[in-house]
Image (cartoon, rainbow, N blue to C red):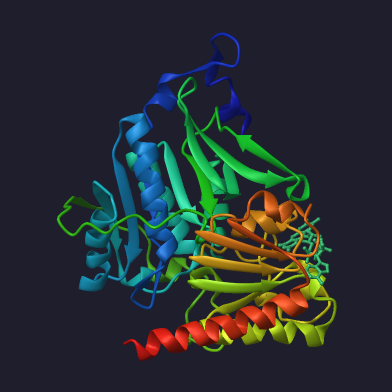
Amino acid sequence: MSEEKAAAPVKKAGKGKYELDDRLKAYQGVWVFIEHERGEVHPVSWELLGEGRKLADKLGVTLSGVVLGAPDLATRRFCEEAFFHGADSCYLMADPILTNYRNQPFTKGLTDLVNTYQPEILLLGATAQGRDLAGSVATTLKTGLTADCTELNIDMENRSMAASRPTFGGSLLCTILTLNFRPQMATVRPRVMGMPDRDTSRQGTIIEHPLVMIETDIITKVLEYIPDNMQGKPQLPFADIIVAGGRGMKKAENFQLIWDLALVLKAEVGASRPVVQANWVELDRQVGQSGKTVRPKLYIAAGISGAVQHRVGMESSDVIIAINSDPKAPIFEFATYGIVGNAMTILPALTEAFKQQLAIAKMAG
Ligand SMILES: Cc1cc2nc3c(=O)[nH]c(=O)nc-3n(C[C@H](O)[C@H](O)[C@H](O)COP(=O)(O)OP(=O)(O)OC[C@H]3O[C@@H](n4cnc5c(N)ncnc54)[C@H](O)[C@@H]3O)c2cc1C
């Protein structure tokens, strides 16, 4: 942080309360960076607009999307989609240089927008692109960034965003306020926040702003696009049903019981960290703090104790069914339904019962 900027922009105004100076007060509004690639917006952007709407309403300010991309109709349509998902306005920076994501022009574009229009809050997805961009934008602007937040709120006394995230290995939750700098920046992983309803009657204002940069200013060039081939890879964050297994499955061969139930339910397979560390399944299937955050309609957890580092990745599931031989297992404290018993006998029984019920339902049309 620069000394100049850090020089007491907030004044203490009573216990735990600070008063923003005029320079910080000039920053108004909540912004969400709309991330896209190859014509597709990352769903985390819509999730963040849903959350941003709540923050903006609490502050009594406008919510805006920020779209940087090629000067074409598709990019413009992302602004309309932002309105459908809750934005009041959308900042659009369209330039051929911004066709593909590159850190340098996107950092320049986004920091120019922030310096010109001065939002008080800027949210980005904690995706590969969002993390890359958020870090460089925050350091360029010399402001605070809270990464991987699990909850966002407004501390009304200080008119500051209260950004919560796990700390000390996930054993504690801390809430961070950025009192001295604006904008207050945060990243949130996909599926941590709910998806807002899409309302196609909503409209908004598009504010266009040019990118002040030419191609020869940029040191990176895009030579070829090699898609990240996600086909065949688990898409846990977007699965409707997940059957997950933990160390209580005892050995790799028993984990087949998880796959059998998942196959019948057309579900994805998830796992706790010890299972991944034992190489029973690949890393992409780990659920939790250092794995994926999921939000399925149904999460079946077999032989998983419910440690906080696993819990933070799946507790937003609509329905959680826990199978555990220990009636005192922590997972029963937050599961919707609990089955106390041996997963090795309960899982095959569930698989058989679901098979029969689904066959009956199919026959009934
Ligand atoms: C920095 C950090 C990050 C971490 N990140 C993650 C993460 O992303 N995801 C994650 O999962 N963990 C993570 N962990 C590890 C986490 O703390 C736990 O150790 C882990 O979640 C425990 O996995 P488990 O529930 O499979 O195993 P255990 O805690 O060993 O639980 C096994 C459970 O199986 C039950 N059981 C035993 N036999 C049977 C049976 N026959 N039938 C039914 N139930 C049975 C037991 O009663 C027990 O409750 C992290 C830890 C740290 C420090």
Residue 58 at x, y percent in the picture:
37, 32
Numbered circles on residues, count: 0
Q: In this view, does 42 lie to the left or right of 136?
A: left
User: Where, by quadrant of the figure, is residue 301 drawn?
Assistant: bottom right
Instruction: Give 217 or 223, whichever is nearer the viewer.
Output: 223
Up the image or down, 94 lies above or below 209; here it is below
Residue at left offset 56%, top offset 64%: 294
Residue 271 at x, y percent in the picture:
70, 72
Q: In this view, does 172 lie to the left or right of 16?
A: right
Q: In this view, does 115 lie to the left or right of 208?
A: right
View quadrant of ligand 1: bottom right
Instruction: Give 325 or 316, whichever is nearer the viewer.
Output: 325
Up the image or down, 239 lies above or below 265; here it is above
Residue at left offset 57%, top offset 87%: 263
Residue 131 at x, y percent in the picture:
56, 59
Q: Which residue lies furthest to the top in this view?
A: 14
Quarter placement of the C terminus: bottom left
Residue 270 at x, y percent in the picture:
65, 73
Instruction: Give 300 or 361, whichever is nearer the viewer.
Output: 361
- Residue 230 is at least partly visible in this image: no
Quarter placement of the N terminus: top right
User: Where, by quadrant of the figure, is residue 208 drawn?
Assistant: bottom left
Residue at left offset 54%, top offset 55%: 316
- Residue 231 is at least partly visible in this image: yes
